[in-house]
Image: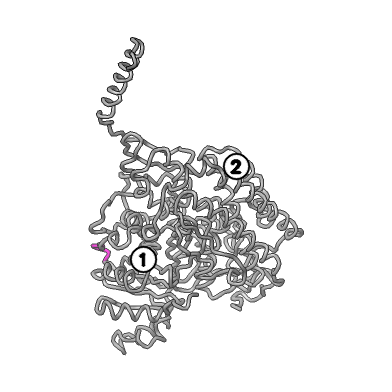
Amino acid sequence: MATITPSEISAQARTAAHMADIGVAVEIETPEMTLNIGPQHPSTHGVFRLVARVDGERIEEVQPVLGYMHRGYEKLCEVRTYPQVTTLVNRIDWLSGYANEIPFILAAERLMGIEAPPRAVYIRTILTEMARIATFMAFLGAFGIEIGAITPIFHAFRDRERVLDLIESVTGGRFHPNFNRVGGLKDDLPAGFLDETKSAMDAILRVCDDLEDLILGNDIFRERTRGVGVIPIERGLACGVTGANIRASGCTIDIRRDEPYLAYPELDFDVVTDTGGDCYSRAWCRLEEVRQSVRIIRGACDSLPSGPIMSKVPRIIQVPPGEVYQRAEGPLGEMGYYLVSRGGRIPYRLKIRTPSFSNVSILPWLLEGAYMADVIAILGSLYFILGDVDR
Amino acid sequence: MSPLALAPEEITASFRDALGEGVESTSTFQGQASVLVSPDAWIAAFTHARDDLGCDFFSFVSAIDWVGEEAENDPGEDAEASTGADEASSGRDEETGAGEDTYRPPSGALLQVVGRITSTAQHHGVTLKANLPKSDPSISTLVGVYEGANWHEREMMEMFGIVVEGHPDPRKIYLTDEFEGHPLLKSFKLGAREVKPWPGDVDVEDMPDDAPVLDDEGNVVEVAVAEGSDSADPEGGED
């Protein structure tokens, strides 16, 4: 029989006392606390507030508070001519202004019965995909930071700048091109654009590989994002979640393929889907979609038709009476305009269906029961732009 | 387009079969199926689209404020022709199919709720509408059918003053609680336009053929004629 020394006895007593303390602490109910996340939180990409009721580390209920950025675009569009509206819709999702113009211009052209010439359609396709790459590069950099990885953003933003330079060389604006006209484009491509595009696309593919190693291959990143914030398909669709957010859950919707517009039917690309539905899958889908965008741009540059960039349009843009819902696959999801015209030079009503508004509406359900530490990962992976939520 | 997609005519016919008297009129303008239902059939219409037509994706729901006929925008003979057809065939003209793809806006002053849903598998969609009287606009909530309608309906309530019955969370979404009025109603004047009327209005008529339209500050209001188009022809061509 082993003898017990006095020091061991006191050690056992200390441990027992310590265990008792823990036991007492566990039995005490943690008080419920209301916590404001935002409106100036860096991971919200704008001014967005979550009022969370938390119990310890768990979130019991969350109420998103919107409207800090509400600019009333739908009202403003009712007192502006069609060419003036394009400047406004540029600013809805400010990271991909060019992609916002497309469905609006297509809606107006559809009601007027005008088609842009093939060259203009191809240039529109190229610029839309460039806007998508720029947006996703910003995501991949920023999402790394939100998870705690500082390095990726420098790689992502370095090569994103090359794409923005290309957009600027064509349109004159990095973010707000206002380059589309009803019936075509303002200008043709500048000299040397195609060569510069080729080398920039090579750079984008290289940085994609780097980011895949740096972010998606990182163990800490995997631990933080795998199985976190899973969106089931049915619930996502009923809430109107679109874009990479729903494709990451295994739903193969892509308006570029389902309801073809621009030059997409003539170009090769795959609809990227994953089955995880979690934060990791959403990031992976966006990275893959950058690669697909590069494929589309290369294909469009190779088969770029020659010819005019503007079709014949009346001097005054007057849209005949009619209603049409024109949607497009924006970088963040389904971007659509329900255009109501009673004839004349101003839209009678323009309902703007933005992807982020519907994407964010799933948050109260998604965050219920989540840990505080996962909130930022979930917010970041949904990737919403506040201008797109609030309009 | 998927081979499974239903044609717009098939979709409108399916609503007529399912809802019967609940369907007030249908349209296939611009290749998009649009069904005007009575407010009582609003929920039934969405349920039918979801369960029987596979429309699992909820796009949006919003409203349009129709202020009634405006003389300057009257399409004239088209409107008269369609009115004549209505009287002649007593509301059965939609069945001919030929009349369905012409556009007929409502003539009276009313609020119209509009919702759009699509099928992710078959790639067809339908626009559902219901006319509400301006005096007492109210409609049942869609939250039970499509969860995503929640926020869209909150926006619709504050922007148009439409009462959404049974809504689980009828607070304002964008506006502050103290805000009075419903901004997207046509009767709600935009503050900037109250102070100064729209400068573009003065140029609506009698524009010189070859000068760009300028507003008071000298900004170009209209886009100049594009390259390659015939600037001598003010109406242009549509090819």
Q: Is residue B191 left or right of residue A206?
A: left
x and y percentages locating residue B18 in the rendered image = 28, 78
Q: Which residues are magenta?
A: B133-137
x and y percentages locating residue A53 in the rendered image = 31, 38
Q: Residue placed farthest to the top in the image?
A: A6
Res. B72 in view: no
Please give the label number shown on residue B115.
1
x and y percentages locating residue A218 in the rendered image = 56, 43
> Residue at 66% across / 47% down in the picture?
A161
Q: Nearer the viewer, residue B210 or A203?
A: A203
Q: Nearer the viewer, residue A227 or B65?
A: A227
The amino acid type of the residue labelled 2 equals Ile
Disc 1: host chain: B
The amino acid type of the residue labelled 1 equals Gly
> Residue at 30% across / 80% down in the picture?
B16
Q: Residue placed farthest to the front in the image?
A: A1
A369 falls in the magenta region = no
B135 falls in the magenta region = yes
Please give the label number shown on residue A106.
none
Q: Nearer the viewer, mark 1 or mark 2?
A: 2
Marks 1 and 2, how far apart at CA: 40 Å
As helix, strand or loop, the secondary structure at mark 2 comes to helix
Tell me where residue A286 sits by quadrant.
Answer: bottom right
